[in-house]
Amino acid sequence: MTETDQRLSLDTAAARTLATTTKTPPQTREISPRWLLRVLPWVDVAAGVYRVNRRLTYAVGGGRVGFVTTGARFRVVPPSLAELPQLRGLADDPVLDELAGRFEQREYARGETIVRAGRAADELLLIAHGKAARIGTGPYGDPVTLGTLAGGEHAGDEHRQWEFTLEAMTACTVLALPWTELRTLAERSPALSAQLARHRISRARPQNKWGEAEIAVAAGHRGEPALPGTFADYDPGPREYELSVSQTVLRVHTRIADLFNNPMDQTEEQLRLTIEAVRESQEHQLVNNRDFGLLHNADPRQRIHTRTGPPGPDDLDELLCRRRKSRYFLAHPRAIAAFHRECTAAGVYPGSAELHGARLTAWRGVPILPCDKIPISRAGTTSILVMRTGEEDQGVVGLRQSGVPDEREPGLSVRCTGIDTRAVASYLVSAYYSAAVLVPDALGVLENVEVAR
């Protein structure tokens, strides 16, 4: 050993045995901004159930029809035919099995005409695959796009003419059923015949443009004419939302809680991380739950498709024009990035808005909130939501019950369930919540948003 190799002072590794360290609380990558939980107005549900009363609506049905495939052949899932207004209420009737087998499959290439305006609408058409554009004629004779139809949607109204031309925007698979087939089958099925009669009666009843039972009002009259008598009819079967729950049991050994509590309380840190995970689960359920999640509770008439694939300014404008007082967009961060790319390509620049101290992208003054709970499919498509919020505006509200036993945060409780024979203490962490859409136009969804381009 040379003279230069001899140490002249204490080594740092040895010195650390006598020193303390400065520690951080446990970190986790799971925590997200959880904007949805922050912006939803929360309604206290005292009895655990929230009932949404509405005016009686005659226009029912209009949802998405489901399909199964065998190779290149598509077949309608029979119970899903009850999503059609004419067949509403027949989900469990065997007549739908026979009806599903009578559809004829047709294939159309991109740009081909599926139906032409002015012809008799003698068929019911279901879009099994692809996307089609509804094209009308503008005031100066030029073609205008009225909207799009995609997988599961339908077109065609009995006893009417086609008011638009339906043109394939992509390769399309269409299932067609002549109305004569439906009438023939109704002659042999009392249940189907009765349902078609009910549908005709409901369409003949006075209703406003939203399908609600009309309230007759006289206006612009002079003198003393007889005024109409009226009343506001209620929906006899209002929807009720029961509070859902996210729960877990946290286990902490009493030796850990007793001996290793300095400088940080081990039980408190364990609870903090567990509560963060429960809150993340809560936001995921509010978006994706098939019973009350926002993605599955948007009215079919409030679901639209992008014009070209990626989300452009025109698509977000279409979402905004379908409702009043839109408060927030909700989109996956990759969808927001795709929107920025489309804005750059179009030579426009989205604005910004400040919310809870953060600067966010905004469009037409409406903040676009990032939410990584909105799924992205394997094909690289996702959805963008827009909503009006609050009970006073008949919007979207969050539901929770405050004052639950051992409440730690509003709607969230931490209850000690005891210590077992192994000296392990257990804590039940529960969050009670749900969400309700008070009227259908409070929530809209832009579907099939491409983010992979």
Image (cartoon, rainbow, N blue to C red):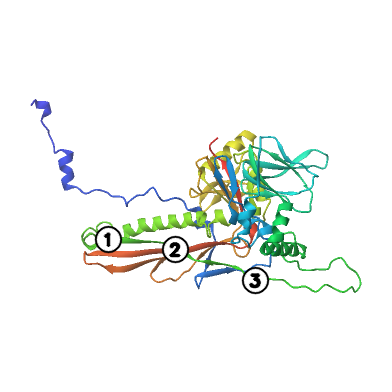
Residue density around tag 2, few if under 14, some if 14–19, many if 20 or more, within 10 Å:
some
Q: What element carries label 3?
A: loop
Give the image location of residue 302, x and y in percent: 64, 53
The residue type indicated by label 1 comes to Val
Which amino acid does the dot numbered 2 rest on?
A: Val
Q: Residue furthest right?
A: 223
Q: Where is residue 14 in the image (x, y as percent from the top left)?
A: 15, 41
Tag 3 residue: 236
Q: What residue is disc 2 on?
A: 245
Badge 3: how crowded within 10 Å, few (<14), some, or many (20+)? few
For label 2, the SS is: strand
> Is residue 153 visible in the rendered structure shown here?
yes
Residue 62 found in image quarter: bottom right
Spot occupied by residue 221 in the image (x, y as percentages of width and height): 88, 68
Picture residue at 12% right of the left edge, 33% below the top: 7
Q: How far apart are marks 1 and 3 (CA)?
A: 50 Å
Q: In this view, does 297 lie to the left or right of 403?
A: right
Q: Position of residue 452 (x, y in %)?
A: 53, 37
The dot on residue 136 is none
Residue 255, by quadrant, is: bottom left
Amino acid type, residue under disc 3 in the picture: Pro
Question: The C terminus is located in which quarter?
Answer: top right
Task: State yes or no: discs 1 and 3 in contact (Cβ < 8 Å).
Answer: no
Q: Is residue 237 left or right of residue 16?
A: right
